[in-house]
Image: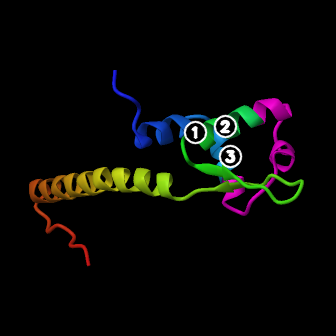
């Protein structure tokens, strides 16, 4: 079995709602593990495990500022995932536009045009 790609690691990390919530919090700015624990009914070691998964996927990084170890969100892996999803969004939009045209033709009305 081939090694998982970056895209595989990104989607695997995003599959968990706790990790998505951690990323949402980090989108507001960096935070320490203790700050990330606050809104969850979880232990610090449990949150640390989630952060480790996010770190292995490249979605977060940890810094070192004196005694502080802030966790920061990293944009590149998410941008790759968005690019991958965008191709499919375009496919479905075109498919729905064709379906709208067909339905309009069957109903005998002119299809709406996009500006």
Camera-side residue of 68 and 106: 68
Apparent side of residue 86 relative to residue 66 in the rendered image (left or right): left
Q: CA distance from mark 3 to mark 1?
A: 17 Å
Q: Position of residue 46 (x, y in %)?
A: 77, 30
Secondary element at image label 1: helix
Residue beneath disc 2: 52
Q: What's the magenta region? A: 24-47
Q: Are marks 2 and 1 in contact (CB under 8 Å)?
A: yes
Secondary element at image label 3: helix
Camera-side residue of 40 and 30: 30
Residue that appears at 45% across and 58% down: 79
Taking 107 as reference, is 54 above or below it? Answer: above
Q: Position of residue 49 (x, y in %)?
A: 71, 32
Disc sitting over residue 56 in the figure: 1
Characterize the local packing of mark 2: few (<14), some (14-19) or many (20 or more) Cα atoms within 10 angstroms.
some
Residue beneath disc 3: 21
Which one is closest to the eye, mark 3 or mark 2? 2
Taking 85 as reference, is 28 above or below it? Answer: below
Q: Residue most toward the bottom? A: 115
Q: Are marks 3 and 1 in contact (CB under 8 Å)?
A: no
- Tell me which label, 3 or 1, sits earlier in the chain: 3
């Amino acid at each position: 079995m081939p090694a998982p790609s970056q895209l595989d690691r990104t989607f695997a990390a995003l599959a968990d709602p706790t990790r998505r919530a951690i990323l949402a919090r980090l989108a507001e700015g960096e935070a320490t593990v203790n700050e990330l624990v606050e809104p969850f009914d979880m232990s610090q070691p449990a949150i640390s495990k989630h952060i480790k998964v996010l770190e292995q996927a490249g979605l977060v990084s940890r810094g070192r500022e004196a005694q502080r170890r802030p966790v920061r969100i990293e944009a590149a892996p998410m941008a790759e995932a968005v690019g991958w999803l965008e191709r499919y969004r375009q496919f479905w939009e075109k498919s729905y536009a064709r379906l709208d045209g067909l339905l309009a033709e069957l109903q005998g009305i002119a299809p709406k045009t996009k500006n």
